[in-house]
Image: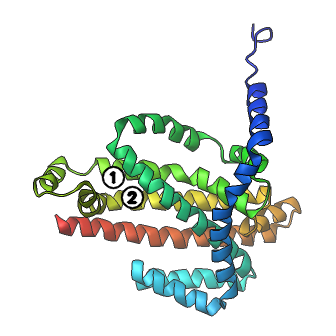
Amino acid sequence: MFDRYRIPLDEWIRMFVDWLVGNYRPVFQNLKWPVEYVLDSISELLLWLPPSVVLLALFGIAWAVANWRIGLFSVAAFAFVGFIGLWDELMVTFAMVLSAVTFCVVVGIPMGIFAAHNDWFYRILRPVLDAFQTTPAFVYLVPVVMLFSIGTVPGVIATIIFALPPIVRLTNLGIRQVPEDVVEAGHAFGCTPMQLLWKIEIPLALPTIMAGLNQTIMLALSMVVIAALIGAQGLGVVVFSGLNRLRVGDAAIGGIGIVLLAMVLDRITQEMSRRAEAQRTRSW
């Protein structure tokens, strides 16, 4: 039966993508410039600054948003990656993650807030997020290459698409979990919708939003490594180059650099989430 009757879905998808590329590829090429500008600005800054300045700034930021122990760990982890000869690759990967997360925050948090206040929008958005989160990471690379070419910027675009759902979902969840009696009290005191959002809903939802940010950062880091397959630079190139040439040492140190970067970002965002939770508890 299945030999005689088959739905040519693959042909339909191919025809749609060919039509999209043939008619709108210049439009997608022009959409690259905000991502390219942010990525180039961050990466050029990180590569231009002396490593000692970057490490000092990293320690100060980690201490300010977390604590001095995490600051010392972050400096030690980045310094170790530098001493094994991968400082430039680390900075490029760090810039890619920061760029992707920046766009995820700018797009994802407002989208999550809007979904929390509009059930019809969330009903439309939910299956899209489900599809994004269940689609294998490698699948994103094909349409991104066809629409945006190859290189580091298309790799960041694929990372943004892949890492966006968690921050949208958890922002929506955090806003929806704000107690109704608190919202009603805000209305009773005459809060405008914007005052209610900024002074009540976002502060109470902040721990959940921070958990979404943590997941988004981890997904972004995993995707920027996979994006090396389409020409993205950074530590992913070291890993895949080592695997292709059977140079176990290169692949191992690239993997170590990725793990240490992930640990630094995870520790910092987890501590930020813990502080947000403690602040919310004190406010109660």
Residue 135 vs 101, above or below: the answer is above
Q: CA distance from mark 2 to mark 1?
A: 6 Å
Question: Taking 258 as reference, is 130 left or right?
Answer: left
The percent position of residue 60, horizontal first and vertical second, equals 47, 87
Mark 2 crowd level (few <14, some 14–19, many ≥20, 10 Å Cα): many
Residue 96 vs 168, above or below: the answer is below
In terms of secondary structure, where does tag 2 sit?
Answer: helix
Q: What's the residue at 47%, 39% (across, down)?
A: 125
Give the amino acid type for the residue marked by disc 2 in the picture: Ile
Residue 104 vs 12, above or below: the answer is below
View extreme (left): residue: 188
The percent position of residue 225, horizontal first and vertical second, equals 70, 61
Q: What's the residue at 23%, 57% (across, down)?
A: 196
Give the amino acid type for the residue marked by disc 1 in the picture: Gly
The reply to whether residue 107 is in sight is: yes
Residue at the spot of label 1:
174
**Residue 195 is drawn in which quadrant?**
bottom left
Quadrant housing the N terminus:
top right
Question: Taking 65 as reference, is 18 left or right?
Answer: right
Question: Taking 262 as reference, is 278 left or right?
Answer: left
Residue at the spot of label 2:
209
Q: What's the residue at 42%, 67% (across, down)?
A: 270
The percent position of residue 253, horizontal first and vertical second, equals 73, 72
